[in-house]
Amino acid sequence: MFATPAPTAQLLLVEDNRSQAMIIERMLQEGGAGFEVIHVGTLREAKEHLESSRVACILLDLTLPDASRLDGLSEIKIVAPEAPVVVVTADNDAGRGIKAVQSGAQDYLLKGQMDSTQLCRSVGFAIERGRSEQQLAHRALHDDLTGLPNRVLFLDRLMYALAQTERLDSQVGIFFLDLDGFKGVNDRLGHLAGDALLRAMAGRLLGWVRPGDTVSRFGGDEFTVLVREVTASEEAALIAERLTDAVRIPVSLEGEEVSLTPSIGIALGGSSQKPNDLLDRADKAMYSAKRRPDTNYEIAVAA
């Protein structure tokens, strides 16, 4: 069985020949796919639509007024990398079909050689495969327990943020948090309570950060926060205090009010910094903060 989209799901048909577009739309109706079909005739129009709307699947002709062969597919995948694409073309070139699939298309259908059942099945399979690929990609880049980005995704976002600092004339702030006392809570109340506590902390941190910032779980009771556009050490200190206030709010677990305090290591850097180096500085500063009697955070000295 192939996936049946919801009646309101949109399918984007990119086809410059209106007669061919009408044939494809009729096939979709006959096959009972239940799509709202949006038809555009150029690559430019397709990109404009994809920049403002999400679609369940894209049916793409390879010969368009403003794109030929696989150029259109390449540009579509840049604008909407997660949208499944089924190429529908009159180009009976087996080699190009293979290249289309290798370039990100889910299937390659020939006009005049497909019927409504084949078309709808191909679209349904493309949507299902797209969902599976997205789920696999999400699991590879996110923590299973909290749903937060993991170390791999965090470093990728950090690399991008560092590259932007020169243009923005600012620094990036890395806040490395370790939850003091978490092991005692986990041992005393059990792993299920410990997991609930970690999820609560993840929600707290997510609720604090601004759009564009990133909260990540590195494993155990360690979290990292990427804050863009930090102007000075004084601002970083204020951020650390706010993160501390968020973590300290008690959590009700097994009939007990549990309150933790984080140790926070902070590193500030710009475009000349390497992501792993900046993260290591924040990690070392966190361990140093654990030994401080006067405060729970420490800002790493610039490298």
Image (spheres, rainbow, N blue to C red):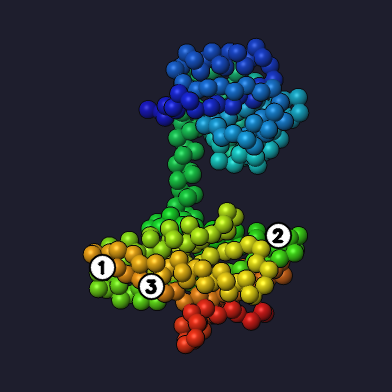
Task: Check disc 1 and report the residue beneath it.
Answer: 256
Task: Residue at 76% x, 28% y: name it.
Answer: 66
Q: Residues within 10 Å of mark 3 (few under 14, many from 20)?
A: many
Q: Position of residue 180 (x, y in %)?
A: 40, 76
Q: Nearer the viewer, mark 1 or mark 2?
A: 1
Task: Check disc 3 and report the residue beneath it.
Answer: 260
Query: Could one spot residue 99 in this view of the protein?
Result: no
Query: Label 1 sits on what residue type?
Result: Glu
Q: Position of residue 90 (x, y in %)?
A: 65, 20
Task: Residue at 46% x, 31% y: name it.
Answer: 125
Task: Name above or below for residue 48 compared with residue 191.
Answer: above
**Horizontal placement of 144 versus 40: left or right?**
left
**Horizontal placement of 232 versus 135: left or right?**
right
Task: Name above or below for residue 156 compared with residue 278.
Answer: above
Quadrant (top left/top right/bottom left/bottom right) for the C terminus: bottom right
Locate residue 197: give its quadrant: bottom left
Query: Could one spot residue 51 in this view of the protein?
Result: yes
Task: Check disc 2 and report the residue beneath it.
Answer: 164
- Sequence order check, earlier mark of 1 and 2: 2
Secondary structure under tag 2 reads helix
Judging depth in this view, the residue of 273 and 137 nearest the camera is 273
Q: Nearer the viewer, mark 2 or mark 3?
A: 3
Q: Position of residue 270 (x, y in %)?
A: 69, 68
Task: Residue at 62% x, 21% y: name it.
Answer: 39
Q: Residues within 10 Å of mark 1 (few under 14, many from 20)?
A: few
Q: Residues within 10 Å of mark 2 (few under 14, many from 20)?
A: some
Judging depth in this view, the residue of 86 and 83 nearest the camera is 83
